[in-house]
Image: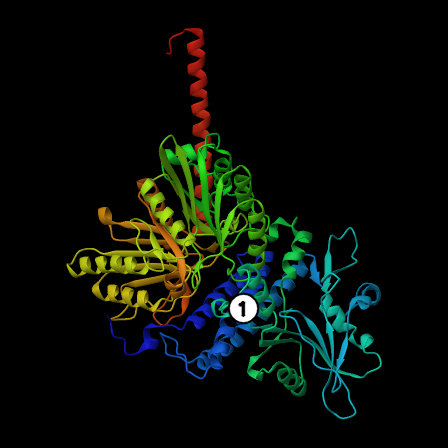
Amino acid sequence: MIEIEDRKKVYTNRELSWIQFNERVLEESEDQTVPLYERLRFLAIFQSNLDEFFMVRVGSLYDQTLLKETVLDSKTKMTAQEQLQHIYHNVRTLLPRRDRSYARVMKLLAEQGIERVDLTSLSEEDFAFLALYFDREIAPLISPQIIDKRQPFPFLKNKENYVGVHLSSKSGAVRLGIIPASGHFGRLIFLPSESSSGKIRFTLSEDLICLFAEKVFEKHQVLEKNIFRITRNADIDVEDEMVDVDFDYRDAMQELLKKRRKLAPVRLEIRGKSSMEFLSYLCEQFTLSEGQAFFNKCPLDLSFVYALEDKVSKRSELFFKPLTPQISNQINEKESMISQIEKKDILFHYPYNSIKPFIDLLNEAASDSSVVSIKITLYRVAKDSKVVNALIAAAENGKEVDVVVELRARFDEENNIDWSKRLEEAGCNVIYGLPGYKVHSKLLLITRKIGNKIQYITQIGTGNYNEKTAKLYTDLSLMTAKQEIGSDASVVFNSLYMGSVVEEVSHLLVAPLCFKPKVIALIDQEIAFAKEGKPAQILLKMNSVTDKVLIDKLIEASCAGVKIKMLVRGICCFKPGVPGLTENIEIYSIVGRFLEHSRILVFGLDDRQKIYISSADFMTRNTERRVEVAAPIYSEPIRRKILDILDVMFRDNTKARAQLPDGTYVHQKAGSVTINSQEMLYRQAYAEADAAKLAQVKNQKKHLKDWFFRRSGKAKK
């Protein structure tokens, strides 16, 4: 094992690396080559990412500060308090950039006729319209409250906008008026404009309520007013909370969701200016330090961007060019999916390939008389899930349908609870995962009985069974009829239903026991080749890298001379190119139109090369606390396809950033040819689909010609 004296020289703190990732998202909003409305969407993504980060990661660190024992980051040895201080500082440096980017984008949109109206400089007509709108549509539906010594401070909801009004008081103490800025009224308010102009003019309900706050508290003197919201800790340790529950697990999860809504605040956001007196009062009420308060110039919640989209969708120049997932050239839609998988392994690459043939496979299995059972793991599914509907149809057709629904998929718990109920009602056998381990694998096993023989159709993926994200996330989905893979998948499902983890399989890599040790063995194999002076290589693509054991093993491989290239979209807890440690490692991150989500592991070169696709990142939570599955790729055409995908991505010089030895990220310099890997892969998908259609047409013509000559009795020339 490599001994590292100066930890900060090679390791990066997980939370600070995540902030770097979100900075890369922010960069997309600043990129003038990105269509204007898409830049606004990247701002909304940046903001929602930050919300979840504070709810989960900052919430977890906040809990650690309350413990008597000091918990240190395994890589940088920072305490929770030190991490929080760095987080607050780094976030505070990004917010002005976010505000400037928002202001620039909104100014450019206004020039395009999409204007968020400035309520500080309204015309008489606009003011009259908004005053009437407020009186009729909003004022009857709001519930203002004055907080003083006689009235307790109310419970405020997580991430909800509130208008805070500082009212004068005889005693001189802060007297607060609060108006909830959401309720039974729309957030987007559209102002009249000339019908011929095509302009879209709007404001937000919280701005309108703040504008007319004096009307609400007309008997009081308003000293100051602003819009604020709090972010609550959402980091509940489900396993700790589930100890000794004596009722249904699903009911217990519903109770935990209620509890999460009431956890302690970890952040205060204020839009507009605030006196120190007013700020101190709010921080005191929420038991927050002033260091946990953040000031913003743009709206605190940018989700209105998605609601506004319907109004501007016809303005095609504001959006990315529409792209349609293509039917893979590996299949023929007119043939049975099962019979095609029997002939050869098939790989889909989302969003470039359509998920429709996979849905067709499920629907075919639901009605195929030879299918006796369907087993699947569900982590995140769409709201109106065609996958779940196919499983329900299978159960109603008398198939045995076993579904592992992971109720602990963070922020998807309620959706999964609802689907689990519907699956049970349809006759599916539903379990909720394992105690202590989330089931994060993407695994499907279709079992057929043909005569006396059992046949498996297995699907292993890197992403969720979700038709919506299949259009937005890059993922890989392997379908195979190889019986050795199906046998391993059967072991995984049997273990899950017996309440245990897999201890041994032959082909799949299955966390928590049979993933990390096998990956380490594969890295050790490359180290051995490098030490013998032979070429050694590792290629990795994943979302995040935090597992210190695997990081240290990669550092050891680098020191031995193994050439390592990595694509890591998000968190990466170590630095490449550090002399004497990681000088043989290159790390890149691609942040673009689609969210890079696929995980690919490649070890070795030429005949000894091993390739896997995986549901797991190199994160301790994935390798030690989750059930994950990685599948080997045995099909030579698919192996070439995956290597081609990696080659395109490593050559990206548009959306790829290279990590430098100091941990910073810089855009790859464009050469004579500009390469945007996501656009190139989509062009390839279109070209492959067109070529497949042309081949099918030629084949149909040939069959028609053969049929004609057979009927006419003429010899073919």
Placement of 514 over or under 291, stated as above or below: above
Placement of 344 over or under 31, stated as above or below: above
Placement of 38 over or under 103, stated as above or below: above
Q: Is residue 353 left or right of residue 45?
A: left
The foreground one among 184 and 93 is 184
The foreground one among 32 and 140 is 140
- Counting from the top left corner in percent of width and height, residue 609 is at 26, 49
Graded by Cα atoms within 10 Å as few (under 14), some (14 to 19) or many (20 or more), the crowding at tag 1 reads some
The foreground one among 630 and 367 is 367
- Residue with the mark numbered 1: 50
Looking at the image, which residue sits at the far left?
532
Looking at the image, which residue sits at the far front?
246
Residue pictured at 44% horizontal, 55% vertical: 597
Q: Is residue 671 visible?
A: no
Looking at the image, which residue sits at the far top?
713
> Which quarter of the image is occupied by the C terminus?
top left
- Counting from the top left corner in percent of width and height, residue 110 is at 68, 61
- Counting from the top left corner in percent of width and height, residue 569 is at 43, 60
Amino acid identity at mark 1: Leu
The image quarter in which residue 265 lies: bottom right
Q: Is residue 285 left or right of residue 710?
A: right
- Counting from the top left corner in percent of width and height, residue 329 is at 43, 36
The image quarter in which residue 119 lies: bottom right
- SS class, disc 1: helix
Q: Is residue 204 visible?
A: yes
Looking at the image, which residue sits at the far bottom?
171
The number of callouts visible is: 1
Q: Is residue 135 left or right of residue 642?
A: right
Residue pictured at 66% horizontal, 80% vertical: 273
> Which quarter of the image is occupied by the N terminus?
bottom left
What is the image's colouring? rainbow
Q: Is residue 11 left or right of residue 181?
A: left
